[in-house]
Image (cartoon, grey):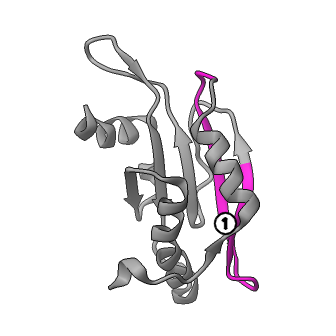
Amino acid sequence: MSSSLVVCEVDESLQAKLKKFRFRKETNNAAILMKIDMEKQLVILEEEYEVSLFKETAFFRLLHYVYKYVHTDGRVSYPLCFIFSSPMGCKPEQQMMYAGSKNQLVQAAELTKVFETRNADDLTEEWLKKQLEFFR
């Protein structure tokens, strides 16, 4: 029942950006950082990154991330990941808005690799590699 709950819609321009991001040709790590506009109850773009990894996770993060993943046998893949970070100690209203919008955003971005953490210190390259091991 909770999978059909939609707390916040995904902004149309963000949906277009997520689709374009899905089919990008570049081979570097990149991310789309999203946030919720609490007044409009809308998931919007916060920032785009072309970086090795992300930090600054003191707040909620809705992160669509493409990662250059080198497998143990030398193959290289570029998995699209959705990372939901919901740190401890945040306001209950924020927790509800972000958690209730996660499924809608995952569906809009057509993602299958969805990871969640409550500890901002977890968001490291080692953590991401461990999460991706399941999808070998």
Tell which residue pokes out farthest to the bottom in this image: 93
Q: Is residue 107 above or below residue 72?
A: below
Residue 87 appears in the rendering:
no
Q: Position of residue 62 (x, y in %)?
A: 56, 60
Judge by depth and name the residue closer to the eye, 16 or 85: 16
* Residue at the image position 45 percent from the left and 69 percent from the top: 103
Horizontally, residue 119 falls left or right of residue 104, namely left
Give the structural element (helix, strand or loop) at label 1: strand
Snapshot quadrant of residue 3: bottom left
Is the stretch drawn in magenta largely helix, strand or loop?
strand
* Residue at the image position 31 percent from the left and 43 percent from the top: 131
- Residue 71 included in the magenta stretch of the image: no
* Residue at the image position 54 percent from the left and 54 percent from the top: 109
Q: Which residue is mark 1?
A: 35
Q: Is residue 68 above or below residue 119?
A: above
- Residue 42 included in the magenta stretch of the image: yes
**In which quadrant will I find the C terminus?**
top left
Tell which residue pokes out farthest to the top in this image: 74
Q: How many marks?
A: 1
**In which quadrant will I find the N terminus?**
bottom left
Q: Bounds of the magenta span?
A: 26-47
Q: Amino acid at mark 1?
A: Lys
Q: Position of residue 104 (x, y in %)?
A: 51, 70
Residue 55 appears in the rendering:
yes
